[in-house]
Image: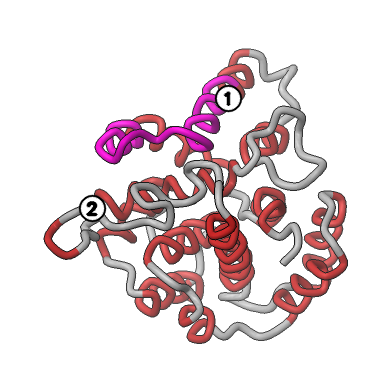
Amino acid sequence: MANLSELVGTFIQNTMSPSGGERIGNILNDLQANISNMANRQGGASGVLNKMLEAAKTTLGNASENPTQAAGLGAVLGSLLGGGSSSVAGAVKGGAFALLAGVAYKALTSGGQAAPGGSAPAFSGGALPVGMTAAQTPADHQVLDTTAELVIKGMINAAKADGEVSADEIAHILGKLKEAGMTAETEAWIFKELSQPLDLSAFAAAIPNQEVAAQVYAASLLAIEVDTPQEQAYLEDLARLTGLDAAVVQNIQQTLGVKV
């Protein structure tokens, strides 16, 4: 779908739970501490993720040193997630994908999921998930487009876990995405997803592999507070229906600093 992948960062910024910013900070800190050693075993985590982690050091460091000149959490996240055409100047393009791909990579390489024979799991980009490095081929871009659709659906579904998304919430989300350059086709698709009833079984069946499942699970933890039984049950069902290993789920929760 046209420009959907470019809106993932903006969608995360404007639909995440009140604790979402803190959880993104936890992700950045965790990946800073852990991803380099793991990626070195796979030939290096060059590309988008490295750029994002370097930007995080600069952006978050400057904000903490001089908070009166920082434009607030929204600007910090905008510069890191790089969502939409109106993102902060200097934003890391594809930062949202790098963030989620990094979480999935870490969880799947250290959380108990291994390929037959005990080797590291295969990813969409070979040694690394597409998103940690820039997309190079039409196949790479197709992976990003498919993942973008499923990540956005996953965040919307998580928001529906304990009730419908209200008309006011729908209007707010669509308004922010329009500001970011959403096309009419994408607007119609997102409106439909926000408005229709939750069907978790059908959604889980559309997730193609564990890499995407891990990214969707991480994005879902950004979308909700997980402070109701319905939200907890939703996450348990999402993990079960997508076949995510319990150790992988625990690793993702630890990376985001969430206890479910």
Q: Is residue 34 left or right of residue 166?
A: left
The colouring scheme, among rainbow, by chain, secondary structure or one colour, is secondary structure
Percent coordinates x, y for residue 132 in the rendering: 47, 43
Q: Which residue is mark 2?
A: 120
- Considering the numbered disc 2 on the image, is that residue within a helix, a strand or a loop? loop
In depth, the one of 183 and 16 nearer the eye is: 183
In depth, the one of 229 and 129 nearer the eye is: 129
The structure residue drawn at horizontal position 78% and vertical position 65%, both measured from the top left corner, is 169
Relative to residue 180, is residue 219 depicted above or below?
below
In depth, the one of 180 and 157 nearer the eye is: 180
Q: Is residue 136 left or right of residue 70?
A: left
Percent coordinates x, y for residue 238 in the rendering: 43, 74
Q: Quarter of the image containing the C terminus?
A: bottom left
Disc 1 marks a residue whose amino acid type is Leu
Q: Which residue is mark 1?
A: 60
Judge whether residue 46 is colored magenta.
yes
Query: How packed is label 1: few (under 14 Cα within 10 Å), some, or many (20 or more)?
Result: some
Q: Which residues are magenta?
A: 35-58
The structure residue drawn at horizontal position 33% and vertical position 68%, both measured from the top left corner, is 244
- Considering the numbered disc 1 on the image, is that residue within a helix, a strand or a loop? helix
